[in-house]
Amino acid sequence: MDYLCSECSTQLSKWEIELNELYPVGKLYCEFCQSKHERQIIKKMAEDFANELDFYDFSFVFTLTILTIEFSNWI
Ligand SMILES: [Zn+2]
């Protein structure tokens, strides 16, 4: 099954599909378009972790956000 970016209709890579499934922002995006929506995804990740831990540790979420940015640059 093909997954196309809802913004530019580019075929999504396996990683891009996985990322969209893990942290859905309502639409499918390729990596290029995804970067424009990165803040939304990071916010979603932070919320997921906060919910999982059942408390909101600001410093932890901040660290997570930095790691996420470095991780996405590394890819
Ligand atoms: Zn795109």
Image (spheres, rainbow, N blue to C red):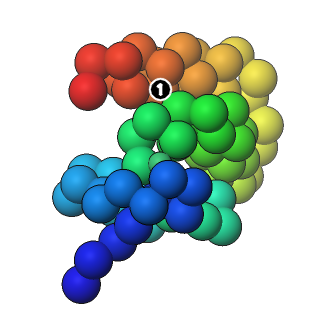
Residue 61, x across and y down, in percent: 66, 27
Task: Determine the residue positioned at 24% across, 84% down.
Answer: 1
Task: Determine the residue positioned at 27% across, 18% down.
Answer: 74
Q: Quadrant of residue 43?
A: top right
Q: 34 above or below 7? A: above
Alpha-carbon neighbours of circle 1 within 10 Å: few (<14), some, or many (≥20)? Answer: some
Q: Tell whether 57 sits left or right of 22.
A: right
Residue for badge 1: 68
From where the camera sits, is residue 61 visible? yes
Q: Nearer the viewer, residue 37 or 41?
A: 37
From where the camera sits, is residue 19 visible? no
Q: Quadrant of the C terminus?
A: top left
Q: Is mark 1 within 8 Å of ligand 1?
A: no
Q: Quadrant of residue 71?
A: top left
Q: Tell whether 23 sits left or right of 31.
A: right
Task: Determine the residue positioned at 66% across, 18% down.
Answer: 62
Amino acid under disc 1: Thr
Q: Nearer the viewer, residue 59 or 37?
A: 37
Total tally of numbered discs in the picture: 1
Q: Quadrant of residue 14?
A: bottom left
Residue 36, x across and y down, in percent: 62, 33
**Label 1: which secondary element:** helix
Residue 66, x across and y down, in percent: 54, 15
Q: 27 above or below 43? A: below
Q: 47 above or below 66? A: below
Q: Nearer the viewer, residue 33 or 14?
A: 33
